[in-house]
Amino acid sequence: MTITRIKPGPRMSQTVVHGNTVYTAGQIADDGSADVAGQTRQILAKIDGLLAEAGTDKSKLLKATIWLSDISRFNEMNSIWDAWVDPDNTPVRACVESKLAMPELSVEIMVEAAK
């Protein structure tokens, strides 16, 4: 089976396509000064772009993993997620509190999708 790497770098690829499955790397906001809602919006826009580049979209999401630096901001993140996700095709999902790589980051999201 073919493996295609989209936006590969020396440490990781932003997306890997294996067969009919698309995997994204954990996505973070470009503007870490934004609040949780703002960071979530930025991340989901990046995910939309990566999925499109891989030939799929959010209606084919299989799985999402979300890390929040402060779980008390769960509802704020969900207000943006719920408006973005395809309500007829919601993925399985985990959302946990975790210390993120940079202190200004509040959210990181990684998804898997079918083609």
Image: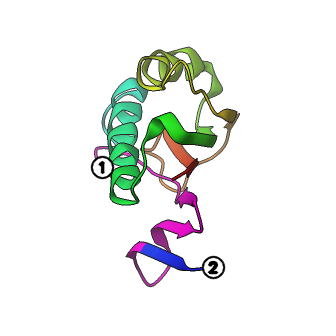
Q: Is residue 62 left or right of residue 28?
A: right
The residue mark sitting in front, 2 or 1, is 2
Which residues, given as a range, are shown in magenta?
6-31
Q: Amino acid at mark 2?
A: Met
Above-or-below relation of 114 to 33: below
Give whichever of discs 2 and 1 has the lower sequence position: 2
Q: Locate residue 99, reporting x and y percent.
A: 63, 46
Q: Locate residue 60, reporting x and y percent.
A: 53, 40
Residue 18 counted in the magenta span: yes
Residue 111 counted in the magenta span: no
**Looking at the image, which residue is at 58% across and 60% down?**
20
**Looking at the image, which residue is at 41% across and 51% down?**
51
Which residue bears the numbered disc 1? 30
Judging from the image, what secondary structure is the residue with disc 1 in? loop
**Looking at the image, which residue is at 64% across and 26% down?**
71
Judging from the image, what secondary structure is the residue with disc 2 in? loop
Which residue bears the numbered disc 2? 1
